[in-house]
Amino acid sequence: MSFLGKFTNIFKKGVELKKAVGQKQAKPVKSATAKKTPVVKLEKIRKISSHLIEEAKARAREIIVEAKDEALKIRTQASDQVRATQANIDKQLGALEEKEKILASTQKQLEFRLQEIDKIKKQQLEKLERAGSLTTKEAKELILKATEEKLTEDMAKQIREAEEQAQQEADEKAKAILVDAMYRGAIDYVPEYTVSAVKLTDEDMKGRIIGKEGRNIRTFEKVTGVDVDLDEEGVIRLSSFDSIRREIARVALEKLIADGRIQPTRIEEIVDRIEKDVNRIILKSGEDLCHQAKVYNLPLEIIKTLGRFKYRFSYGQNMIAHTLEETKIGVHLAYEAGANVNVVRLGCLLHDIGKVITDEEGSHVQIGVDFLTKYNIPQPVLDCIAQHHEDQPFSSKEAILVYIADAISGSRPGARYEDYGEYVKRLTKLEDLAVGFKGVEKAYAIQAGREIRVIASPEKLTDAACTKLAKDLKDKIQKELTYPGQVKVNVIRELRTTEIAK
């Protein structure tokens, strides 16, 4: 029940009590015949009435106090509600003002953008008006040039970010893996640079080698399949595209000279015996190579073919040394990368087998794949061999590891040498490729062709354009040049201003 209802009930009871007391006091005196009310009883009623009245007054005062307290509380709550409502209204007004400011700012930006659009539209219309007098080819070149200039900055930024990210993520780990792999691939084998030449202590021996009417030299060339050059003093040079034939001829000629009996029958006998000896050496070399590479149960014909690596050189690097070194590097990289070690091991061992198959036409990669297919070599291994010079796209990480191991072994300092004329030609072409780009003033091939230093014109190329130039030149070198190892492209843009005070 509410406070007002309590107050009303109490007030009604007090009024009724007061009326009851008044009625008893005003009651007329009965007739003499009626029975008289004792005085004591009447006094007692008066006291009770007086006490009830006082109690009612006291209760009324309490009710009034409670009513005031309740009214004050109601007033306070009403004030709090009013203040909260006012604060909420102020907050909403503030939010509305903020939205109005944002709306006004957005309106200004839209107006500014519209102005920019109108400006660009006018510029494009002007360009179209100028292009109206151009040919289709000229208009296309103009559009492409404008697009390239606009995107050059973004392209350079993306190139730098990608290179930095790749450098941070891969540089340290790659260095550690490669250094460790090269350490494990180090072998105690010194490549033998066999020159197909036989030294003579007596020039008269040349006449005995030629024989009567040239029959000895003709027989020797016929049974060995090599050309004999006697023009140089003190040396007999033997030439043939087949390193095995050349080696048989060299050993046979040395034995004939030491024996002194040089005649057609003796020549045929010595060459036949040396050929059998060399074939045994080839088989033994193939078996040793397979055992050192920890590859077993290969077909005998493949082992014999691998043994021919003993007499085969690539840029002065012996093929057995190169194959064994590459296999050790590739196996360690496969362990580090979680690749199939057996596939990498066999791929490294067999990757150059086509180089010693001389009776087939084509690249050594395709010749090797065709040869090994006859002996049911697994397809993943054939893929490694077919892709180790990037003649085909890489199909597995094992193929990539074989390619990397081959590059490390072949391009490390001191591993190979190349013909001086080809070397000069390669460096000249490298410089010509760089100078052919627009904005390049000079280009220098340094560090034996492992770096191309490009001097860019600061008036014609910006920093961003130089970044793009380096990438374009790198792509062109990869596409058009054949080179060992890698070529570092270094583009330099430097502005110098000189004045002389007099």
Image (cartoon, rainbow, N blue to C red):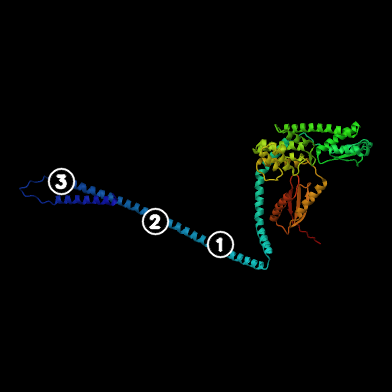
Q: Is residue 100 above or below residue 248?
A: below
CA distance separating discs 2 and 3: 58 Å
Q: Residue 472: horizontal and vertical position, in percent?
A: 71, 53
Q: Residue 493: horizontal and vertical position, in percent?
A: 73, 55
The amino acid pointed to by label 3 is Glu
Element type at mark 1: helix
Q: Nearer the viewer, residue 57 or 102?
A: 102
Which residue was labeled with disc 3? 43
Q: Is residue 364 left or right of residue 45?
A: right
Q: Nearer the viewer, residue 385 or 20?
A: 385
Q: Residue at x 65, y 49 (%)?
A: 162
How many numbered discs sit on the rendered protein?
Answer: 3
Which residue was labeled with disc 1? 109
CA distance separating discs 1 and 3: 98 Å
Element type at mark 3: helix
Q: Quadrant of residue 90?
A: bottom left
Element type at mark 2: helix
> Badge 3: few (under 14), some or many (20 or more) residues near its Cα, within 10 Å?
few
Q: Residue at x 66, y 46 (%)?
A: 166
CA distance separating discs 2 and 1: 40 Å
Sequence order check, earlier mark of 2 and 3: 3
Sequence order check, earlier mark of 2 and 1: 2
Q: Is residue 222 above or below residue 95?
A: above
Sequence order check, earlier mark of 1 and 3: 3
Q: Nearer the viewer, residue 167 or 223?
A: 223
The amino acid pointed to by label 1 is Gln
Which residue was labeled with disc 2? 82
Q: Is residue 209 left or right of residue 325?
A: right
